[in-house]
Amino acid sequence: MCRNCGAIVGAGEAICGQCGAPLIGAVVLPRRPVRDAEAMRFARAILTRPATFTIILLVANVFVFLLMQNSGGTENHETLRLYGAKFNSLIEAGEWWRFVTPVFIHIGWIHLLANMYGLFILGPYVEKLYGSAKFVVFWIVAGIAGVAASYVASKYGMQEGLLGRFLARGGDGPSAGASGALFGLIGVLFVFGIKFRHELPEGFKQAFGTGMLPTILINLFIGYALPFIDNAAHLGGLLAGAVMALFVGYKRPGERPSIAHLWHALQILALLLVVVSFSLVARNYTGAPPALLENVGDAASRILRGNQEDVRSYIDAANTGQKAFAQAINGDASEAEAAIEKLEGAPRLDDEAGALNDQLKELILRARDLAVAEKPTNNREQRARVQQLNGILDDFNQWQARRLEWTKANGERYGIIIQEPPSPREANEPQS
């Protein structure tokens, strides 16, 4: 009851409905939120669907990253070239698969974690809204579109002026990453929210469609502010995702599933394109095999030993080089040039192995120059020659020690073993 006018007031009211006087000691009860039943039904129907291929793509990206880390490092230009990163000059030389493979390659841990976090957050929404088949097609096509946009921007020097610097960086350095595909998913969700806004619950309208604009603008600005980010790839993927979403319907809640033969066929073709592209990477691979999963078993070890022809060529060149060095140090330089040429053509199994070959070439050159030099005519020249000879031999002994250390540390990766010479007793024993 209102103490001012005596009117009866309902429980929980803060003021009198008759005179407007505040009610002393009134307890204002909070209103219960009214749940949007339609939004809950929609969310439950969508979010309970599986997101299998999001996890598969995430695992595939991490696996390729680990292989590269164990093959020289993901920030090593040679490793990026070997694994299929985008180089304009190599694409123009006929290596078309470099439009596909960069989507699964990342340069450094931060690059990988940023893109995989984006895939983990956005991938399930797109896959649950559209289904796995469409999601896979979206990801791969948008990724290829991003690489293609980067290729075009670099090829035609589209880095002049403010707009050009925003769009592209130019040049033919390595470019890789799933960010083009990731922007493709952003483009899909942006168009999805606008295209189906009349049938979406309020919460979904706010999350997608124009709700994606801050994400798009912030990321494009970051791409402009940081010179090592390829905004052309971002824009290419974004546009591809948006265009695909314009013409593709999503899987509505309660909608009777239909057999989408076309989309499953496109999904298979997209995955087959990825497999073929990485098969061509493996076929053209000339570097060191990755030191990964070495203890899984003999079968895995055989796979990881890599190209045995490269290993044999490397060993043959090193043995020829040592033989030529020994002959040259004894005054016969006839084999030196051929040995140096063979070392130059030998595969570089890894950076350290290549450096060992370079050092051996230098030793052969020094021994050759000493062999063809004029003979000393006095004691002073003789002492200088002996001192020079001893210096070369000391450096050769140090080289042998470094090669032994490399063989102990890395030889198993290439099937190279250190064979101890048999003892005199073992050498005389009959072999069974």
Image (cartoon, rainbow, N blue to C red):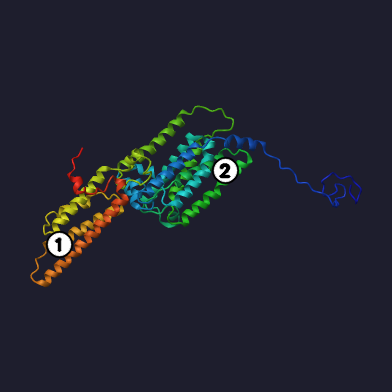
Relative horizontal placement of residue 401, taking residue 277 as reference (left or right) = left
The residue carrying pointer 1 sits among few (fewer than 14), some (14 to 19) or many (20 or more) residues within 10 Å by Cα, namely some
Relative horizontal placement of residue 165, taking residue 96 as reference (left or right) = right
Q: Secondary structure at mark 2?
A: loop
Q: Position of residue 167 (x, y in %)?
A: 44, 52
Which residue, given by chain and number where applicable, does mark 1 sit on?
A: 369
Q: Secondary structure at mark 1?
A: helix
Q: Is residue 87 visible?
A: no
Q: Position of residue 378 (x, y in %)?
A: 8, 71
- Amino acid at pointer 1: Asp
* Above or below, comparing residue 167 to residue 282 in the picture: below
Q: Position of residue 327 (x, y in %)?
A: 13, 56
The residue carrying pointer 2 sits among few (fewer than 14), some (14 to 19) or many (20 or more) residues within 10 Å by Cα, namely many
Q: Residue at x 43, y 44 (%)?
A: 61
Circle 1 or circle 2, nearest the eye: 1
Q: Position of residue 391 (x, y in %)?
A: 20, 65
Name, please, the residue furthest toward the left. 377
Q: Which of 4/368 is in front?
A: 368
* Above or below, comparing residue 263 to residue 170 in the picture: above
Relative horizontal placement of residue 318, taking residue 80 as reference (left or right) = left
- Amino acid at pointer 2: Phe
Which quadrant holds residue 389? Answer: bottom left
Q: Is residue 222 visible?
A: yes
CA gap, disc 1 to disc 2?
74 Å
Q: Residue at x 52, y 43 (%)?
A: 122
Which residue, given by chain and number where applicable, does mark 2 sit on?
A: 208
Q: Residue at x 50, y 51 (%)?
A: 219
